[in-house]
Image (spheres, grey):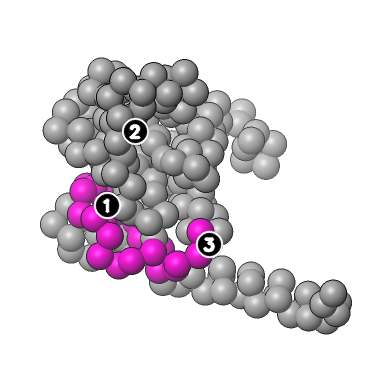
Amino acid sequence: MQSLSSQLLFASDYFRQLAALSENFEASDRQSQLISFGEGIDRAAALVYRQTQQQKKVIFIGNGGSAAIASHQAIDYWRNGGFPAIAFNDGALLTCIGNDFGYEQVFSKPIATFAQPGDVLFAISSSGQSANILAGARQGSQIGCHVITLSAFKTDNPLRLLGDINFYVPTMAYGFAEITHLCICHCILDGLMKGVLPESQMVDPALSLSENIV
């Protein structure tokens, strides 16, 4: 068993690495041109705000831990932010499509049916290589959705090429990728709720970030 000092050293180093990642996030546009991370957040927030003001919705997709982020954020964007948001994570839906059409289409099929031009689609994948997330992002673009991607691992992962706004976290660790993807989504929502991001206003002044975030 490791000594207490070794455990404390690991914990300290872990959070130091996590904090350092925040200085190295990357954001890019559909032409793969790098933009500042802050500008990426501003653009994403503006998309969510403008499109939902026009009766559009926000859609989240992801696998595994990213699916948990998708469900979490769909709830938060709706419950705390007042934005219409959904995640296609129903077990019967996923197994039906996986069985009948193949797992690669578990997100592209419902997107083809339920998404509308102008919706905002968050496609989340740590590797940026999950076939069903890539198919979902492509389907969203084909319909006319505004696609926001969140990825990590390899710098040349294909998901980074598919979004109108692409957030990339330079890490090969699932935990760091998932934590930072969750934080990016929360940053967009919390900024909108605080009214500090472009074209936003307090969605509901009665909502308190400290009291209402799930």
- Which percent across, then down, holds residue 43? 29, 49
The local crowd at label 2, few if under 14, some if 14 to 19, many if 20 or more residues have their Cα within 10 Å, is some
Residue at left 30%, top 36%? 104
The amino acid marked with disc number 3 is: Phe
Location of mark 2 (residue):
103
The amino acid marked with disc number 1 is: Leu
Look at the image and say whether residue 3 sits in the magenta stretch. no
Q: Which mark is residue 87?
A: none
Location of mark 1 (residue):
159
Q: In this view of the protein, which residue sits in the foreground, 66 or 23?
A: 66
- Tell which residue pokes out farthest to the front in this image: 99
Up/down of 40 relative to 55, above or below: below
Up/down of 176 relative to 149, above or below: below
Q: Are marks 2 and 3 in contact (CB under 8 Å)?
A: no
Residue extent of the magenta highlight: 153-174
Label 2 vs label 3, nearer the camera: 2
